[in-house]
Image (tube, rainbow, N blue to C red):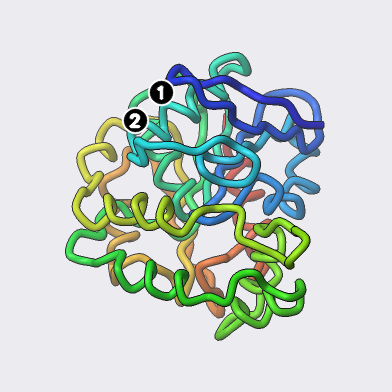
């Protein structure tokens, strides 16, 4: 089931109910993703509560326009969550950063948090290379197999993931997220850090780090040290998309964390 939520600045966000009943569990997707990429995770999380996800602004079926800032996108998440009440929040990549900042800004809305392979400090990096790579992709893609081929190297799980992030048209398949919008989001990460937000997070946090992830070396361990109540696991053999690279290890880590919550 899907519905829309109107943001305070007038955008319609697509919200997807992914099953379950009880306390809310909010899933936040990564850059270029969409709510439905969480489907496989939602299958087992739905036994623990009401699983809800939404397409971030400029992604999936949601409207998109600036500002492309973390502050605005976190406010979007809060406006989706406000009617539902305090939730367990699970975020991948961009969604993990948004989850951390949401927990810092609105502790009343986040009772526990899972952050999958994300850091809080990418200063000094540039979004230019990512923009150039995405811009060079041969859109439209002629088939879903072409999407898998374009994104599935060196880690094949990305190819499957990105087949959920395209729209079919008369000329083939195109990415649901605009490359320039995604680049604008990533550009802010290259100039702004969120170390200070960690001190304001009081809920239990699980930091799931990939062996071949995006975080600068040692940064996830430092994040764990600065959080009031953090568990840090690093899963061998995984890339940035941990929940797809090793679903079993990811689900065991998340389940063990949730089982320890009061």
Residue 1 in percent (x, y) is at 82, 31
The residue sitting at 58% across, 17% down in the picture is 85
Q: Is residue 233 left or right of residue 43?
A: left
Point out the residue furthest to the bottom here: 154
Q: Residue furthest top?
A: 83
Q: Nearer the viewer, residue 129 or 31?
A: 129
The dot on residue 107 is 1
Which of the pair 235/32 is nearer the observer?
32
How far across and how far down the image is residue 44, in percent? Answer: 78, 48
Mark 2–mark 1 Cα distance, whole angstroms, equals 6 Å
Q: Residue at x 26, y 37 (%)?
A: 197
Q: Disc 1 on helix, strand or loop? A: loop
Q: Are marks 2 and 1 in contact (CB under 8 Å)?
A: yes
Rendered position, 220 above or below 136: above
Residue 260, quarter of picture: top right
Seen in the picture, residue 110 relative to 99 is either above or below; the reply is: above
Residue 244 in percent (x, y) is at 66, 66
Q: Which mark is residue 104?
A: 2
Whether residue 61 is situated above or below residue 72 in the rendered picture: below
Query: In the image, residue 144 lies at what x, y percent?
Result: 76, 72
Q: Residues within 10 Å of mark 2 (few under 14, many from 20)?
A: many
Instruction: Specify the farthest residue to the front.
Output: 170
């Amino acid at each position: 089931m899907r519905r829309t939520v109107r943001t305070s600045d007038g955008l319609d966000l697509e919200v997807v109910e992914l099953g379950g009943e009880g306390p809310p569990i909010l899933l936040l997707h990564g850059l270029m993703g969409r709510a439905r990429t969480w489907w496989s995770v939602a299958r087992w999380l739905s036994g623990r509560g009401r699983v809800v996800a939404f397409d971030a602004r400029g992604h999936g079926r949601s409207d998109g326009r600036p500002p492309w800032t973390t502050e605005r996108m976190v406010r979007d998440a809060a406006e989706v969550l406000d009617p539902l009440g305090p939730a367990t929040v699970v975020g991948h990549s961009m969604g993990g950063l948004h989850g951390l900042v949401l927990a810092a800004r609105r502790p009343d809305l986040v009772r526990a948090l899972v952050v999958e392979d994300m850091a809080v400090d990418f200063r000094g990096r540039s979004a230019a290379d990512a923009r150039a790579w995405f811009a060079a992709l041969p859109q439209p893609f002629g088939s879903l197999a072409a999407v898998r081929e374009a994104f599935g190297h060196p880690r094949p799980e990305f190819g499957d993931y990105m087949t959920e992030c395209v729209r079919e048209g008369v000329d083939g398949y195109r990415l649901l997220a605009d490359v320039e919008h995604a680049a604008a989001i990533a550009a802010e990460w290259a100039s702004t850090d969120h170390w200070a937000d960690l001190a304001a997070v009081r809920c239990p946090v699980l930091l799931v780090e990939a062996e071949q992830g995006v975080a600068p070396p040692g940064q996830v361990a430092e994040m764990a040290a600065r959080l009031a109540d953090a568990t840090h696991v690093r899963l061998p053999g995984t890339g940035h998309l941990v929940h797809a690279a090793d679903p079993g290890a990811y689900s065991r880590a998340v389940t063990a964390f949730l089982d320890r919550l009061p």
